[in-house]
Image: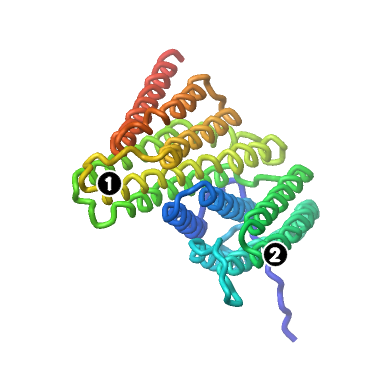
Amino acid sequence: MSRVHRSRPVLVEEAHRATTFEIFFDLVLVFALTRLIGFMAESLGPLTLYQGLLLLLWFWYTWSCYTWLGNQVRADNGPVLAGMLAAMAAIFVAALVIPQAWQRHDGVLSPPLTLAIAYIVVRGLHLGLMTYASSGNPQYRRQTLRFAVSTTLAWAPLLVGALLGGTAQAVLWAVAFLVDFGGGRIATAASFGEVRSGAHFAERHGLVLIIVLGESLLSAGAGAGLAVLAWPVLLAAVFGFAATVCLWWLYFVGVAPAAAEVLTSASPRTRRRQQLASDAYTLAHLPLVAGVVYFALGVHLILASLTDQPRHPAGEPMGWLATAVLYSGTALYLIGRLLFLRLTVGSSPGQLVAIGVVLLLVPVARTLPALAALGLLVVFLAALVLYEQLTRAKGARAS
């Protein structure tokens, strides 16, 4: 009689790095973010921005949970691979119904209910994979049980909100996220967690940010439609590209490598590394990613407005909301970067000043034609990059 051997999770080691499968998982998340940009651009308004932000928080928290899991056990092996593939399919379905996620339908399986069920599937699979990964690890098993309480409690307002729709949906879905996320934070704080590979954890967050930056160009470029050969539209697209390069530079040149060194140098079994991973990466990278999403939304709106106003080559001044989206998205990115630096290698007063300057530019940009408002933002970001490069070079010579 043959024996059926139960597979054991393959634990991550300190030298582990991100796998191609994990990058594949990231692409599905970023697809959801591009759908969010299209959804908010279709009918821009305070309510739409709130709805988009709430879904952005959902998707980010989901991605973070699977990133932590992939730092415990290999994501490209056995049941974890199968479970994450199923989760990817559920995320893909959720992303497809985003444009109708806040609309009431008479069908049995409405888009809001489809999205809610997809999210429950993703979170349920995560709990199952955490249980599998906790084999032989009582500490991780206790953390899984704590996660399970808040996660399953969040499913009730999620489903009820999807069924009721309207204001009830907006409120109950926010409650569901707060219960799920808040419970997860409590579970993490209550257990002495372990980041098995600091290099892997830092690399995963850097990779998802670079993918979001790349996809933001696609989303922003979608606003140009077929009019990209018109010189104002083409110039705006170049401005958007230049601003994206600046955002990339501000994180990946100097900042990301130094912060990763801080994380990897902390002992795997100390609370210091766990706190760095939880605060500097899971939390501080949320405004970084959200900032890119709203920046891309702003560029998308400018390109769309230029194609719709052929008699105004530079475009008419943007509305307050569209201007705030573009500049506040940039400010949000800089806020995330400031928090990231403060929690890892330390920050300087100049970085806080930069955030204040970009916010003060909002009323100025509001009076400018759309193309000039985007050009002003590019000038600011290029000046900030140049200033930091000169400061870094001066510090290197002094040392």
Image point (39%, 35%), residue name:
249
Q: Which residue is mark 1?
A: 306
Whole-percent x and y of residue 49? 51, 48
Query: Pointer 1: residues within 10 angstroms few (<14), some, or many (20+)?
Result: many
Location of the N terminus (image quadrant)? bottom right
Residue 115 picture quarter: bottom right
Whole-percent x and y of residue 327? 43, 35
Image point (57%, 45%), residue name:
201
Q: From the viewer's perspective, is residue 290 above or below residue 383?
A: below
Residue 296 visible in the displayed image: yes
- Residue 231, numbered label: none
Image point (28%, 45%), residue name:
237
Q: Is residue 391 left or right of residue 129?
A: left
Residue type indicated by callout 2: Val
Secondary structure at badge 2 equals helix
Q: From the viewer's perspective, is residue 224 above or below residue 244?
A: below
Q: Which residue is mark 2?
A: 160
Q: Nearer the viewer, residue 198 or 252?
A: 252
Image point (55%, 52%), residue name:
51
**Circle nearer the N terminus (2, 1):** 2
Residue type indicated by callout 1: Leu
Query: Pointer 2: residues within 10 angstroms few (<14), some, or many (20+)?
Result: some
Q: Is residue 386 left or right of residue 155?
A: left
Whole-percent x and y of residue 157? 71, 60
